[in-house]
Amino acid sequence: MTLTTGKQIGWIGLGRMGEAMSKRLLKAGHKVSVWNRTASKAAPLVEYGATIVGTKQDLAHCDFVFTMVSTTNDLKEVLFGEGGLVAGSVKPKVVIDSSSISQEGSAEVRQRLEAMGVGYLCSPVSGNAKVAKAGKLLQVASGPKALYTEIEPCLQAMARKVMWVGEGELARIWKIAHNTMFGVVIQNLCEITVLAEKAGIPRHIFLESINDSVLGSMYTRYKTPTLTNLTFDQVTFTPKLLLKDMDLGLAAARAYGVAMPAAAATRESVSRMVGRGHDDIDFAVLLQETAADAGLVLTSENVKMSDGLES
Ligand SMILES: NC(=O)c1ccc[n+]([C@@H]2O[C@H](COP(=O)([O-])OP(=O)(O)OC[C@H]3O[C@@H](n4cnc5c(N)ncnc54)[C@H](OP(=O)(O)O)[C@@H]3O)[C@@H](O)[C@H]2O)c1
């Protein structure tokens, strides 16, 4: 049984992730009012019961407002910029941000919100939009424990597992560490897949064997159809967003004095991919780039396979 809070919920940011996550809240029976900069992306949520509002400040009367935008600056803009959520006299009770942003940016947002009497919880997620749609996200939170307890039923509506990792911005560090591994794993998966294919093992057979080995994971399994059939036009996460996350990882490594050689090499590889103009495409296009570096031209293997996310 899903618990609803009976609270007024607002949502800002209906990109790939925000759309899938807010839909789960709506499906669980929560009352959600939504705003997106590109208004057309909000329309499909109406059939799930969403109320579309015309401005961010129309959400200021809500108890809880979730944000899912791209970067730290985008979060600051939707909160504090002109017409921002908390720029008027009415303020929401709590802001819960799920964007992948820096620890420092998040701390500044916390300081400004708490100074206005607005509670703040960081709640980044593990999983892409398809994972979110299937209800299989992992959602981690940090901030005041009492706030977390209050918001938990909403998080549970969006995720298969929710966890509180501590006070302040600790969930940002969790997400930064998570996404650094996310980058390093795809980098290595592409390298070894190209190695295996150049040596003569068909891609889908190699990937299937890795998925069934001790190294297989939900991540390697759900990327396998894309890597096999080269369906990079089905965008889950872009090279640019991955580069942002690798930079966040390396900045945190510098701040804490931790050497991360694998992450540093991956960052340069992702940067080259972005520099080559790969933009509105899935980050798994890294496979094609790695193959090109090895003088290998890839073709789709056209194999029908499961990504393990069917609900
Ligand atoms: N995709 C994934 O697999 C994944 C997984 C976990 C976490 N994340 C993180 O989640 C966040 C969102 O990712 P996404 O894949 O959903 O990105 P996306 O599809 O590009 O969506 C970004 C959203 O932010 C809005 N936005 C960006 N800048 C804005 C601004 N200045 N003012 C108002 N709205 C703004 C966009 O509005 P418009 O529609 O108007 O452009 C859109 O709704 C990122 O921080 C990403 O790193 C992504």
Image: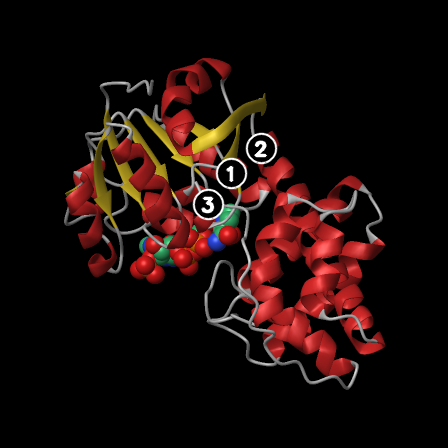
Task: Please tell me how crowded label 3 is: few (under 14), some (14-19), or many (20+) other residues with Cα within 10 Å.
Answer: few
For mark 2, what is the residue? 171
| Quadrant placement of the N terminus | top left
> Reading the chain from its start, which is encountered first: label 3 or label 1?
1
- Percent x, y of residue 211: 70, 50
Q: Viewed as shown, does residue 304 lie left or right of 63? A: right
Q: Position of residue 117 (x, y in %)?
A: 34, 23
* Residue in front for this viewpoint, 67 or 304: 304
Mark 3 or 2 closer to N-term? 2
Q: Is the CB atom of the residue marked by disc 1 within 8 angstroms of ligand 1's nearest atom?
A: yes
Nearest-to-viewer mark from 3 and 2: 3
Q: CA distance from mark 3 to mark 1?
A: 23 Å
Q: Is residue 75 left or right of residue 48?
A: right
**Vertical side of 215 occupied by 183: above or below:** below
Residue that label 1 marks: 124
| Mark 1 element type | loop
The residue located at (79%, 81%) in the rendering is 294
